[in-house]
Image: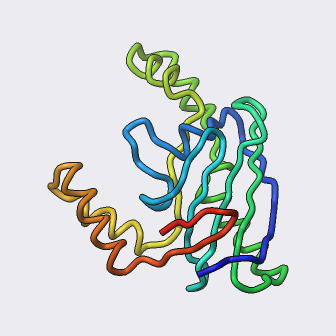
Amino acid sequence: MNLEEEYSVEIEAIPPYNFELTLRKPAGWWWSTPYEDFKKDTCWSVTRFNNKLLGLKLHSIGTINKPQIQCTLYSRTKMNIGKKQAITRILKRALKTEEDLSEFYKLSQKDLILRAVAKDLYGMHTVGWPELFPALILAVTLQMASMKRSNQMMNLLTAKYGDQASFDGKTIR
């Protein structure tokens, strides 16, 4: 499916915010889908909004201490202002841009192990997709399974039920 309509928005995050660590976890987990393409400071992914496939290009244009993300959304049809605002709210939640970690960093200074973790993963945020279905699929595929088997299950599910979108010169499942 070709997604040609574009909508762009810049999103600021509460610092510290490490774009790369937030979207590409050190253990290798993806942000939204196993087939997203991540290159330094840019992530191409796909998701659904109101049952419509959307392409996402997320690009860091800031720093860890002055974070800003350029988000370009691609769809088959034009989006009205209400949809644009709703998608922007969901993206902020999914990217955890409004999550204030200052209390964690304050607390981490009092513990030797947490201090090391906070230093190594400085600015990393959790993911926060607000939909129930992806969380359930992740819970099922991770349950009492090795990482290899979890990846196999996710690949099979995506191959059988996933959609493919082409946008910004990329094709993402």
Q: Is residue 159 above or below residue 100?
A: below
Task: Name the one closer to the observer, 91 or 36.
Answer: 36
Q: Is residue 138 above or below residue 27?
A: below
Residue at the limit of the structure toward the front, as seen here: 169
Q: Residue at x 68, y 53 (%)?
A: 58
Residue at the limit of the structure toward the top, as seen here: 112
Q: Is residue 118 above or below residue 133?
A: above
Left or right: 124 as drawn, with respect to 134: right
Residue at the limit of the structure toward the right, as seen here: 81
Instruction: Examine the image and state in which quarter residue 21 appears.
Output: top right
Left or right: 128 as drawn, with respect to 148: right
Asked which colour scheme the image uses, the reply is: rainbow
Task: Name the one closer to the observer, 122 or 151.
Answer: 151
Q: Residue at x 50, y 28 (%)?
A: 121
Left or right: 103 as drawn, with respect to 139: right
Q: Residue at x 61, y 51 (%)?
A: 43
Q: Residue at x 58, y 81 (%)?
A: 1
Q: Position of residue 127 (x, y in %)?
A: 51, 52
Q: Position of residue 137 (x, y in %)?
A: 33, 69
Q: How many marks?
A: 0
Q: Position of residue 83 (x, y in %)?
A: 75, 80
Task: Name the one closer to the observer, 126 or 146.
Answer: 146
